[in-house]
């Protein structure tokens, strides 16, 4: 038989207990500015002694951002849509990448795609867009012509008439009766019945009915298949700039940080009341408010310290649009004497405003390629792009040749890795580049 005995036993263990103020500080540090006020409102909902002063987001001016953009050729304007992997922007952008080599024309075309609405139309005035982009109207019209050659047919149209005409031209041909009417006699579809159209155009009644049947096969909303597109508004948590002495500053944007304000009547009640329960309740409320105020101050101090170092370290990227330097989170945490988890909370979801544009602060972190190579992936891609730009057009470099070129400069990579980075940059293989360059030479003759 088993012999069960109960006896006292003493065990020693170590546990980390988080106080309410510590948990509040951790949460406040993690949240971006636009979510911070709502969280504090929920946390202090039963606290009558303090009120939250919400930020005035309208004072800053919103930016509809969906691609990381700046003020170089890479970034023509901030008002572009945020592409998901399966949305209209990404679908058309992939076609542009195959149709055009990397360069200004492709960037202009991508700029146009970013300004399409959810139906696939270019609603904005083309001349205004050209002015905002800092290019000529002819350059933007040339890019628009390329976009309108993409699928779905009718994409990039500036009106319903142009949308239907683009589809009819592709489906029935430029000289088809429907195509010609959409181009030259658009008003006839609104002002005439089929019988009047038959007499006016010299066509039989059956031919006019066929035109209407063909018209109904066209799609007035070519982008509708991808559904509505949600606009995301980004508000900067940190603003980076250089002063007149060329010194870099990174300031926490206090306009988007909520403030706490004590209500004077409760301060007076606490000082004058003789009831112990009221005094204890108000003391607890004031203690909670002090924790929240302290958490906000710590958030601002930590975020400023982290952002200032990161922007200074990645100054070439943030101010001159050059490749990122390698910067690991654990190295940054050790330099700033923070725990890595604290560092990651500080940058999580935070938006940086700098000359490059509105970008996630976490973008400035860049893992090195490997233990034997200190170059970042961004630097490797930039070098591959430079090599392709300066290659012999009729004898472009293969991925193996590019791999050897990188190895000679201390950047040892596998050929498949070079191929992957080349594809991500939008360049076709050497054989396709050679064929395309050869065709270009023939056209020039």
Image: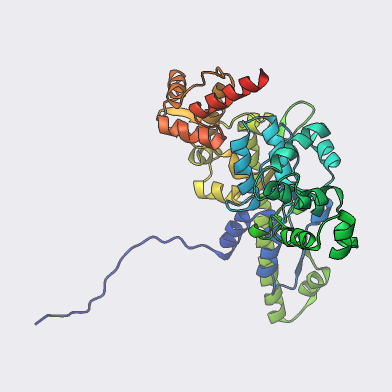
Q: How many marks?
A: 0
Residue 102 location, quadrant: top right
Residue 236: image x %, image y %?
72, 47
Q: Is residue 336 left or right of residue 47?
A: left
**Farthest left residue in view:** 1
Residue 298: image x %, image y %?
64, 51
Please report the residue visible at 82 percent of the width from the left and 68 percent of the height from the top.
Answer: 264
Q: Is residue 141 visible?
A: yes
| Front residue (pair 87, 435) | 435
Reply above or below: 409 against 164.
above
Residue 316: image x %, image y %?
64, 29
Residue 21: image x %, image y %?
59, 62
Q: Is residue 319 left or right of residue 162?
A: left
| Front residue (pair 307, 217) | 217
Which quadrant of the rendered structure holds the N terminus?
Answer: bottom left
Reply above or below: 95 against 276.
above
Q: Is residue 250 visible?
A: no
| Front residue (pair 386, 53) | 386
Please report the residue visible at 65 percent of the width from the left and 61 percent of the height from the top.
Answer: 291
Which quadrant of the rendered structure holds the C terminus?
Answer: top right
Residue 105 location, quadrant: top right
Residue 93 location, quadrant: top right
| Front residue (pair 247, 284) | 247
């Amino acid at each position: 038989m088993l012999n069960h005995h109960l006896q006292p036993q003493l065990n020693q263990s170590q546990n980390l207990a988080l106080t309410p103020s510590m948990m509040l500080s951790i949460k406040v540090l993690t949240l971006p500015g636009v979510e911070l006020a709502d969280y504090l409102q929920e946390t202090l909902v039963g606290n009558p002694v303090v009120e939250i002063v919400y930020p005035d987001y309208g004072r800053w001016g919103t930016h509809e951002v969906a691609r990381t953009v700046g003020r170089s050729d890479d970034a023509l304007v901030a008002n572009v849509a945020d592409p998901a992997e399966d949305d209209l922007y990404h679908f058309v952008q992939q076609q542009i990448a195959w149709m055009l080599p990397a360069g200004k024309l492709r960037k202009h075309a991508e700029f146009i795609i970013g300004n399409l609405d959810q139906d696939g139309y270019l609603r904005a005035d083309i001349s205004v867009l050209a002015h905002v982009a800092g290019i000529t109207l002819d350059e933007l019209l040339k890019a628009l012509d390329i976009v309108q050659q993409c699928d779905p047919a009718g994409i990039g149209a500036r009106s319903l008439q142009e949308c239907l005409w683009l589809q009819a031209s592709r489906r029935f041909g430029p000289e088809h009766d429907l195509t010609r009417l959409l181009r030259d006699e658009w008003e006839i579809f609104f002002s005439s019945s089929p019988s009047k159209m038959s007499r006016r155009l010299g066509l039989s009644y059956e031919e006019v009915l066929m035109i209407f049947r063909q018209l109904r096969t066209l799609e007035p909303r070519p982008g509708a298949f991808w559904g509505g597109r949600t606009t995301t508004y980004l508000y900067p948590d940190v603003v980076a700039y250089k002063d007149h002495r060329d010194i870099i500053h990174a300031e926490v944007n206090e306009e988007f940080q909520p403030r706490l304000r004590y209500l004077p009547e409760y301060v007076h009640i606490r000082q004058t009341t003789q009831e112990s329960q009221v005094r204890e309740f108000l003391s607890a409320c004031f203690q909670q408010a002090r924790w929240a105020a302290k958490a906000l101050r710590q958030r601002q101090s930590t975020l400023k310290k982290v952002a200032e170092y990161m922007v200074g370290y990645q100054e070439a990227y943030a101010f001159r649009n050059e490749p990122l330097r390698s910067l690991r989170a654990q190295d940054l945490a050790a330099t700033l004497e923070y725990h890595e988890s604290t560092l990651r909370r500080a940058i999580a979801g935070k938006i940086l405003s700098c000359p490059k544009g509105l970008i996630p602060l976490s973008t400035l972190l860049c893992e090195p390629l490997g233990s034997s190579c200190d170059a970042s992936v961004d630097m490797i891609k930039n070098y591959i792009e430079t090599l392709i730009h300066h290659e012999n057009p009729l004898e472009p470099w293969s991925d193996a040749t590019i791999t050897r070129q990188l190895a000679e400069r201390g950047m040892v990579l596998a050929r498949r890795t070079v191929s992957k980075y080349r594809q991500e940059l939008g360049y076709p293989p050497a054989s396709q580049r050679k064929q395309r360059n050869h065709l270009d030479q023939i056209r020039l003759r």
